Image (spheres, rainbow, N blue to C red):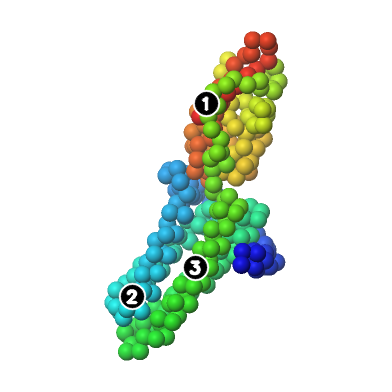
Amino acid sequence: MARLIARLLAAQDGWARPFGDFNHRWLNALFRPMLPIRDFLNGTWLGHPVHSAVTDVPIGALGVSVILDLANQRGAADIALVLGILAMLAAAVTGAADYSDTDGSPRVRATVHSTLMVVALLVFLVSVLLRVGNPVDRAAPVVVSIIGFLILTAAAYVGGDVVYLFGNMVDRHAWRGAGTKWLPLEAPDDLPEARPTKAKLGINSLVLVRRGDTISALHDTCAHAGGPLSQGQIVDGCIECPWHGSRYRLEDGALRRGPAVYDQPTYEVRRAEGGGWEARRRS
């Protein structure tokens, strides 16, 4: 079954890739002038993606609506349906903010997910229209709602792939534990002033920034989507990712601008006794 579903989803790439590229362009243009709003919708303030938290609300409300319909609880079912639709709209707005900074295969799969969600939303709206006037025979709107919920379930499955298969909006450093040992750091002996410099600490790549006698060290891989911070720039005491513009404070890796929602791991750096540098993870 899993292979069949995977082949079915892969078959959608032909239309989803160009459609996704088109949507990405206008969404990116929409959110670029209002970065604080985009960050709020991403969940920068929460330290957790907002979209994944909000999506449970419409699924729950619309599921309850179907159950109440089958139990012939007309008024309660209608209220749950309307609340579910409103929650879908809220989830769509937060999802659009995430989508505006999603690239590659995750964007293609997210396009399939969002398209199915829009179809489900339209089906639920048809169900609402069929309920207007509280008709005696409610078979049609109930059947339409059930169809809408099945489409919603399929869309949620695809949305799960975006997170669990492709790792979109997942902290790139979730499995990196704090180290206690000082390890040799492969870095230039004479670090340039206020310029991101890539260094190697075992299997990890770091970005170093020297400001006077202070050396700030962060993991080079951006927590948001894996962008190379060493290719970024210094802005207001932060290192800015060159891919999507996330900013992390140099002194402690604290997130200062999204679309990332997680802080960046930082490292201590010191001179080694035999010359050169050594470092260990701090946070």
Q: Amino acid at mark 2?
A: Leu
Q: Disc 1 and disc 2: Cα gap in Å? A: 53 Å
Picture quadrant of residue 59 = bottom left
Residue beneath label 1, please? Answer: 282
Q: Residues within 10 Å of mark 1 (few under 14, many from 20)?
A: some
Foreground of the two, 16 or 280: 280
In the image, is 188 to the left or to the right of 255? right
> Which residue is under mark 3?
153
Residue 168, x across and y down, in percent:
57, 51
Please name the residue shown 52% across and 26% down the image. Answer: 282
Q: In this rendered view, identify the residue nearer to me: 174 or 47.
A: 174
Secondary element under disc 3, as helix, strand or loop, is helix
| Count of marks, rendered view | 3
- Who's the residue at 38% across and 74% down the image? 66
The label shown at residue 240 is: none
Residue 68 is tagged as 2
